[in-house]
């Protein structure tokens, strides 16, 4: 039995990490893929939990060794999804979320045609900036750079299967949950999950 693979993208600060975190807290059978990154850990970030923090040389070696499904340079740092981060979980029937940028989504769509992609938009530009400040983890310069990038990132929402405006957090969380749960009911998934039952129901 295989799990479903989801990509969630948004401009920095729109809320994707919080939304994925809240969803995972409710469901044992959903996990987030832990990316590799060359950026420095933020206060409170744990190696192996939020990211696998690596130096640039190691990251480049992993690229050479074909360890990544996809990788991209975002805000001057490298980020990548390693193959081992997701295959094992999907094989166990766990739904896996990739919190990756639009460039990563382009690569993943090519590799995994049935991947489900979601884009999170903020309710306004002002609110996006205010969330980046309130999160309190990036310097003013980093926030300015992320805001400058936000508009061009948001143009990519059209390439995604689902778009959500993260205004009210609980409402967005419930929308996200419904998308994920409804995908489990797709015929191809139900057929493998309930193969024995279906065989019995259809037997002469
Ligand atoms: P945040 O978006 O403010 O939470 O900042 P992060 O530093 O956590 O993420 C930076 C950017 O890298 C975001 O656009 C992520 O979606 C993207 N990102 C994170 N992990 C990956 C990955 O494994 N692959 C790709 N392609 N992008 C990633
Ligand atoms: P991202 O992962 O997209 O960069 P985060 O999940 O880190 O964004 O959210 C950025 C900040 O905005 C966090 O401090 C988070 O608590 C807050 N936040 C997220 N969603 C909402 C919302 N719907 N309303 C108000 N604040 C939010
Ligand atoms: P942050 O530095 O705030 O953790 O992440 C910045 C951006 O990088 C976010 O938009 C995040 O989604 C993206 N990102 C994180 N990990 C990856 C990854 O493995 N691959 C790609 N392509 N983007 C990533």
Image (cartoon, rainbow, N blue to C red):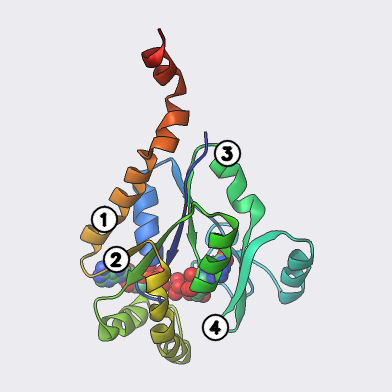
Q: Which mark is residue 91?
A: 3
Q: Nearer the viewer, mark 2 or mark 4?
A: 2
Left or right: 89 as drawn, with respect to 8:
right
Q: Nearer the viewer, mark 3 or mark 4?
A: 3
Mark before the other along the chain sequence, 4 or 1? 4
Q: CB under 8 Å between callouts 1 and 2?
A: yes
Q: Which residue is mark 4?
A: 75
Mark before the other along the chain sequence, 3 or 4? 4
Residue at image coords 39%, 15%: 202
Mark before the other along the chain sequence, 3 or 1? 3
Rendering quarter of residue 67: bottom right
Label 4 to label 1: alpha-carbon separation:
29 Å
Residue at image coords 33%, 84%: 129
Closer to us: 62 or 181: 181
Q: Which residue is mark 1?
A: 175
Residue at image coords 32%, 51%: 179
Mark before the other along the chain sequence, 2 or 4? 4
């Amino acid at each position: 039995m295989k799990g479903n693979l989801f990509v969630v993208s948004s401009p920095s600060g729109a809320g994707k990490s919080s939304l994925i975190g809240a969803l995972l807290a409710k469901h044992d059978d959903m996990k987030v893929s832990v990316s590799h990154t060359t950026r420095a850990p933020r206060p409170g970030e744990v190696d192996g939990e939020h990211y696998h923090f690596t130096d640039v040389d190691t990251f480049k070696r992993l690229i050479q060794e074909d360890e990544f499904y996809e990788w991209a340079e975002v805000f001057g740092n490298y980020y990548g999804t390693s193959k081992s981060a997701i295959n094992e979980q999907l094989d166990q029937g766990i739904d896996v979320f990739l919190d990756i940028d639009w460039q990563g989504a382009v690569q993943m769509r090519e590799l995994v045609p049935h991947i489900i992609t979601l884009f999170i938009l903020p309710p306004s530009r002002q609110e996006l900036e205010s969330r980046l400040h309130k999160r309190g983890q990036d310097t003013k310069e980093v926030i300015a750079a992320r805001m400058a990038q936000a508009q061009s990132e948001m143009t990519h929402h059209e390439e995604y299967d689902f778009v959500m405006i993260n205004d009210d957090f609980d409402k967005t969380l419930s929308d996200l949950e419904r998308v994920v749960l409804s995908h489990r009911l797709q015929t191809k998934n139900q057929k493998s999950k309930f193969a024995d039952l279906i065989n019995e129901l259809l037997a002469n």
